[in-house]
Image: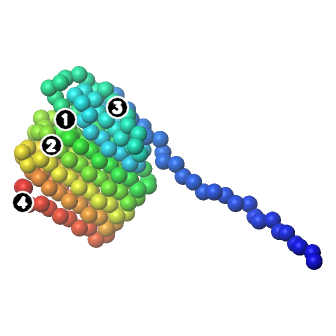
Amino acid sequence: MDRLIESLEGRRMMSTTLPTLDVILAVASDGKTQLTVNNAARVKLQQFAPGTVQVTSGGAQTEVFTGDDVNNHGTFLGVDRIVITGTNGDDSVDLNDTDIPASISTGNGLDTIILFSSAPTSVSTSGLAVVNINGGNQNDTIIVAADEDNPGSIMALINAGNGSDIIGVSGPISYTIIGSHGSDTVVIDSSSL
């Protein structure tokens, strides 16, 4: 009995890696100190200690020294604005304790953006921390919350983009929500306004 052995065609193992997280603290052309986080696929950004910002991504932590003042905990000392840019994949961005202008843009993908502020602000001309959030296309979840003890601490412009998005707003926040194509759900916690 003759046995016929046929070889299998070549096989490829598909794999993917997250883009490299890029964290930059630099003075921008307008003279303002800007903390930039690029390729923010899964990132949490918070004031770690006075003068130190902690960026956590996929379990790895990066600490950025921004200044030295023990009296300004939670205010991103030495940073005038924060710019976070995600990827075209499913991003998760968590920005805590901000009281300065910030811009968060996650691009395409099923993104989750959480912004929480527990500190009063004194940065913008209106006395509010201006936060621009752009969820991009697809179904995103965007949550913006502020501590009830700091009324009017955030002014948020939320652009949900295309997709069926869920947007939640809680606390003393001035906000504008822009929806687009898709069935968006907006939940406002008016008990704290």
Depth check, front residue: 63 or 87? 63
Amino acid type, residue under disc 2 in the picture: Ser
**Label 2–label 4 contact, CB within 8 A:** no
* 147 to the left or right of 21: left
Distance from the alpha carbon under mark 3 to that under mark 1: 15 Å
Q: Residue furthest top?
A: 68
**Label 3–label 1 contact, CB within 8 A:** no
Disc 1 crowd rating (10 Å Cα; few below 14, some 14-19, many 20+) is many
Residue 93 horizontal/vertical position (percent): 32, 49
**Label 1–label 2 contact, CB within 8 A:** yes
Distance from the alpha carbon under mark 4 to that under mark 1: 25 Å
Q: Is residue 193 something that shows in the picture?
A: yes
Residue 119 horizontal/vertical position (percent): 14, 39
Q: Is residue 85 something that shows in the picture?
A: no
Q: Mark 1 sits on what residue?
A: 74
Q: Earlier in the sequence, mark 1 or mark 2?
A: 1
Q: Mark 2 sits on what residue?
A: 118
Total marks drawn? 4
Q: Earlier in the sequence, mark 2 or mark 4?
A: 2
Above or below: residue 184 compared with residue 12: below
Q: Mark 3 sits on what residue?
A: 63
Depth check, front residue: 36 or 146? 146
Say which element carries label 4.
Answer: helix
Image mark for residue 191: 4
Q: Please give the name of the residue rendered at 70% of the width and 60% of the height, measured from the top-left corner.
A: 11
Q: Please give the name of the residue rendered at 20% of the width and 41% of the height, measured from the top-left corner.
A: 97
Q: Please give the name of the residue rendered at 32% of the width and 60% of the height, measured from the top-left corner.
A: 140
